[in-house]
Image (spheres, rainbow, N blue to C red):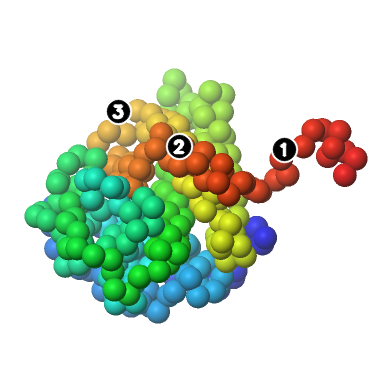
Amino acid sequence: MNPVLPQEAVEFAGTARRAFESLGGVDVARRAEADPDSREDVAKLLADLGVDELDPLADPEQAAAAAALCEAAGRVALPYPVGGVVLRSAAGLPVAAVPAAPVRVDHGDLFDMWLACGPAGETMPARAVGAPLGTRLGPFVTDLEPVGGAAEDVLDPASGQALLAWWLTLSAWTILGGLDRAVELATAHAQDRIQFGQPLTAFQTVRFQLADAAIAVAGLRELALFTLWRLHAAPDHAWPDVVALRSHALDVARPVLRATQQLHGASGLCDEVDICVLVRHLQPALRLPAGAEDTARELAAAIATDGFDGLFPHGATAGDRTSA
């Protein structure tokens, strides 16, 4: 496993980040809540970036570029289902991993039809039902209605399982981008905020909180890179790794978002502050298609069925490892 993304993917991510910032950064999400039609600007920008030409299932280089794009999108809470669009079906339908019931997806209103992947990898064409729910923790979460039968272009159950695995992986990269940016925002605020005559970073407790958050995000990045490699190196055995990545992303997100928002003080709850918008727009990725408890159960089932290799050797005693 190469512990870094290919240079081409890094350069593509840099281009995407600059493009997202030129569009307004987190302000794009703010504008979208006030004017949902403004998301069309995001669609045009993604087309200009060549997203339609990406196929992460084709080769590791394109997979790395797709992951880097999703990370860049997560950093600015980009109001668009980037991972689903990158994973479009052969018929051009955006892909979404959905719970068994109710069938929901973020930004479901943007497309007439979706290719929905259920918990077992089953696929079905589905259409949006009504307007987005408009809840505080999911402004654009939309109900989908299956239109009957399996998707004609994804008849092989293994293909549906592969799409589900890739969707979960790219979603984890989006979460990673959001968490990484949250740590940056909290660090900058703590350096600028003067309390009792000195910056917040002068206090040991604050430094510990920032260090813990940064280390947690760095660890998530390592696991995300491993899973990305695993999906191409051993696709038939990668499902436990994918679920482990999803589970770890949820476990890391909770304390990191809590700490970084709290370090902003009361302003961390104000929509005028980027951390608040970032936390809110990450919620659908953290809650759909399943939360931490259901994901942990799925991970246990996957390990029981397929085993689990993971990043490091495990299951042996210290003596066994020493003798080896």
Residue tagged by mark 1? Answer: 315
Residue 276 or 56: which is nearer the viewer?
Answer: 56
Per the model, the C-alpha gap separating discs 2 and 3 is 36 Å
> Does residue 181 appear anywhere in the picture?
no
Q: Amino acid at mark 3?
A: Ala
Residue tagged by mark 2? Answer: 297
Discs 1/3, front: 1
Q: Secondary structure at mark 1?
A: loop
Quick one: quadrant of the N terminus?
bottom right
User: Residue 47, labelled with which disc?
Assistant: none
Q: Amino acid at mark 1?
A: Gly
Residue 95 or 284: which is nearer the viewer?
Answer: 95
Q: Position of residue 213 (x, y in %)?
A: 52, 36
Discs 2/3, front: 2
Q: Name the residue furthest top.
A: 196
Asked whether disc 2 touches disc 3, contact meaning CB atoms under 8 Å apart, the reply is no
Residue tagged by mark 3? Answer: 266
Per the model, the C-alpha gap separating discs 2 and 1 is 20 Å
Asked whether disc 1 touches disc 3, contact meaning CB atoms under 8 Å apart, the reply is no
x 40%, y 64%: residue? 157
Relative to 291, is 242 above or below? below
x 52%, y 53%: residue? 239
Relative to 323, is 98 above or below? below
